[in-house]
């Protein structure tokens, strides 16, 4: 996922933090497993985000670059960003 969209680096950082915390004994295997399951759900949701946003993976990369860190955009503003980037990517 990170190779396709570098704005997803926070997922790698979160995963590494979970591993580090487990290795230092911050929680046991049952808690770690539960955290892994929840993390896997988050990854699944992220993989579906392009579909939800009606964007290709390439368009999602540009969209993320234009809107992150997360901006407080209205639905209309989000649609304008999507229209602009689709036009830009065609050029």
Image (tube, helix red, strand yellow):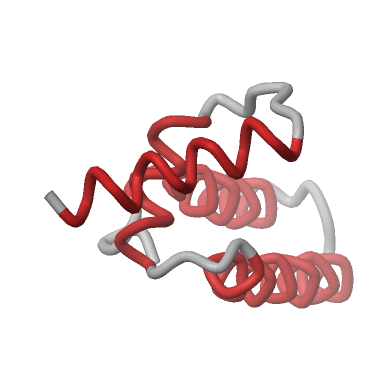
User: Residue 88 occupies which quadrant of the picture?
Assistant: top left
Expressed as whole percent of the image width and height from the top left, the position of residue 12 reads: 47, 53
Who is closer to the viewer here, 4 or 59?
59
| Residue under the point 85% across and 72% down | 34
Seen as rendered, the residue at the extreme left is 91
Which quarter of the rendered picture does the N terminus lie within? bottom left
Above/below status of 22 relative to 62: below
Relative placement, left or right, of 63 versus 4 is right
| Residue under the point 36% across and 51% down | 61
Expressed as whole percent of the image width and height from the top left, the position of residue 26 reads: 79, 47
Expressed as whole percent of the image width and height from the top left, the position of residue 49 reads: 61, 66
Above/below status of 41 relative to 70: below
Relative placement, left or right, of 28 versus 65 is right
Expressed as whole percent of the image width and height from the top left, the position of residue 66 reads: 42, 31
Relative placement, left or right, of 48 versus 32 is left
Who is closer to the viewer here, 32 or 7?
7
| Residue under the point 18% across and 56% down | 90
Who is closer to the viewer here, 86 or 68?
86
Relative placement, left or right, of 40 versus 57 is right
User: Residue 2 occupies which quadrant of the picture?
Assistant: bottom left
Above/below status of 88 relative to 77: below
């Amino acid at each position: 996922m990170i190779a396709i969209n570098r704005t997803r680096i926070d997922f790698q950082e979160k995963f590494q933090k979970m591993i580090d915390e487990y290795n230092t004994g911050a929680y046991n295997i049952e808690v770690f497993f539960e955290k892994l399951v929840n993390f896997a759900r988050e990854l699944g949701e992220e993989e579906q985000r392009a579909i939800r946003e009606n964007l290709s993976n390439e368009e999602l990369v540009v969209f993320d670059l234009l809107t992150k860190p997360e901006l407080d955009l209205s639905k209309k503003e989000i649609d304008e960003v999507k229209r602009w980037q689709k036009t830009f990517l065609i050029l």
